[in-house]
Amino acid sequence: MTYKLSFGSNAMKERSNLDNNIKIAFKKKIEERLKHPEIPSALIDSQNHIYKI
């Protein structure tokens, strides 16, 4: 199954202000979540399948 990830404009602004080491760690976490996104403890909205990172 293919998953889609989207960010709001505020999130992109915040990301651009992060230290490079944090950006790398964040990218790894996102890649991990795209492979296995449905973690019950991270569930925000079950109807729309929205999970926090």
Image: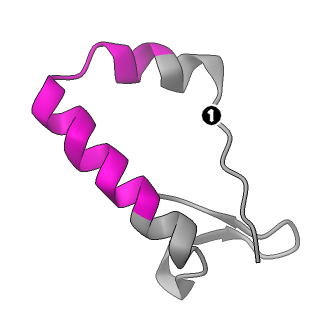
**Percent from the top left, x then y, of residue 52?**
53, 59
In the image as oriented, which residue stretches furthest toward the bottom? Answer: 40
**Vertical order, 8 against 33 (above or below):** above
Left or right: 52 as drawn, with respect to 32: right
State which region is magenta.
Answer: 13-31
Mark 1 packing: few (<14 Cα in 10 Å), some, or many (20+)?
A: few
Q: Residue furthest front?
A: 2
Which is more toward the observer, 49 or 26? 26
* In the rendered image, the vertical position of residue 23 relative to residue 43, given as above or below: above
Disc count in the image? 1
Q: Vertical placement of 9 versus 53: above or below?
A: above
- Asked whether residue 15 is drawn in magenta, I would say yes
Name the residue rendered at 35%, 15% in the picture: 16
Q: Which residue is mark 1?
A: 7
Residue 43, percent from left and from top: 61, 74
Whole-percent x and y of residue 7?
Answer: 62, 34
> Secondary structure of the magenta portion, mostly?
helix
**For the view shown, which residue lies furthest in the right direction?**
47
Q: Quadrant of the N terminus?
A: bottom right
Query: Is residue 20 left or right of 5 when viewed as pictured?
Result: left
Picture quadrant where residue 2 is located: bottom right
* Residue at (15% x, 23% y) in the render: 19
Q: Residue at x 55, y 86 (%)?
A: 40
Q: Amino acid at mark 1?
A: Phe
- Residue appearing at x 53%, y 79% in the figure: 36
Magenta highlight on residue 47 = no
Q: How is the image coloured?
A: one colour
On screen, 19 above or below 33? above
Q: Quadrant of residue 17?
A: top left
Q: Secondary structure at mark 1?
A: loop
